[in-house]
């Protein structure tokens, strides 16, 4: 598993979701038991009034991990859904590593369990998969989990 490359693509949109990005999503990427090789944060905000800076994103990562962070502006299907962000991030991953990488996507309101990447990689190699879809644990506003998907 050591030679498998993993890129985290994080989609973000809206100033009201900035706190979730900086305090939930990106820290969960940084705390992975199997670190990702590249983090691509793609903003779907208006580039003229963009309130999010690369330094904000880098502040969520430790020392040398900051070198693995890229901050891009979505120039595809902007302000419609996360698909343009994900496509922009996936193209960045492919242009960096070619087809020899795994791409893990999340939005700014998502949080990965600390072994998410490691578990997905183990599943992919043990089952000889080309893609892995993980389960989801929904969290309420109080932090208590709701029904997991799938059960």
Image (cartoon, rainbow, N blue to C red):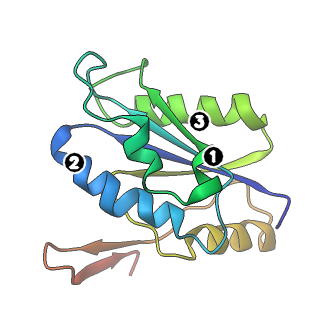
Q: Nearer the viewer, mark 2 or mark 3?
A: 2
Q: How many marks?
A: 3
The image position of residue 81, as x and y in percent, is 31, 33
Hey, which quadrant is residue 42 in on the image? top left
Q: Secondary structure at mark 3?
A: helix
Hey, which quadrant is residue 14 in on the image? top left
- Give me the residue at 42% from left, 46% from top: 57
Residue nearest the observer in this picture, 25 or 78:
25
User: Up-down: is 22 above or below 115?
Assistant: above
**First along the sequence among labels 3 and 1:** 1
Q: From the viewer's perspective, is 112 left or right of 81? A: right
- Mark 2 vs mark 3, CA separation in Å: 22 Å
- Give me the residue at 61% from left, 29% from top: 91
The local crowd at label 3, few if under 14, some if 14 to 19, many if 20 or more residues have their Cα within 10 Å, is many
**Which residue is the site of mark 2?**
17
In this view, which residue lies farthest toward the front? 63
Q: Nearer the viewer, mark 2 or mark 1?
A: 1
User: Up-down: is 3 above or below 31?
Assistant: above
Q: Secondary structure at mark 2?
A: helix
**Which residue is the site of mark 3?**
90
**Which residue is the site of mark 1?**
68
The image position of residue 40, as x and y in percent, is 53, 41
Q: Quadrant of the N terminus?
A: bottom right
The image position of residue 38, as x and y in percent, is 64, 47
Q: From the viewer's perspective, is 7 left or right of 148? A: right
């Amino acid at each position: 598993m050591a030679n498998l490359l993993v890129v985290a693509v994080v989609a973000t949109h809206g100033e009201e979701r900035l706190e979730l990005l900086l305090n939930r999503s990106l820290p969960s990427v940084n705390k992975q038991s199997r670190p990702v090789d590249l983090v691509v944060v793609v903003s779907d905000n208006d580039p003229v009034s963009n309130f999010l800076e690369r330094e904000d994103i880098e502040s969520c990562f430790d020392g040398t991990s900051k070198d693995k962070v890229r901050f891009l502006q979505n120039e595809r299907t902007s302000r419609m859904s996360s698909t343009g962000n994900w496509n922009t991030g996936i193209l960045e991953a492919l242009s960096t590593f070619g087809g020899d990488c795994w791409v893990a996507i999340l939005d700014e309101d998502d949080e990965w369990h600390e072994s998410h990447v490691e578990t997905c990689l183990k599943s992919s190699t043990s089952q000889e998969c080309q893609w892995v879809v993980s389960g989801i644990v929904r969290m309420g506003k109080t932090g208590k989990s709701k029904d997991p998907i799938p059960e």
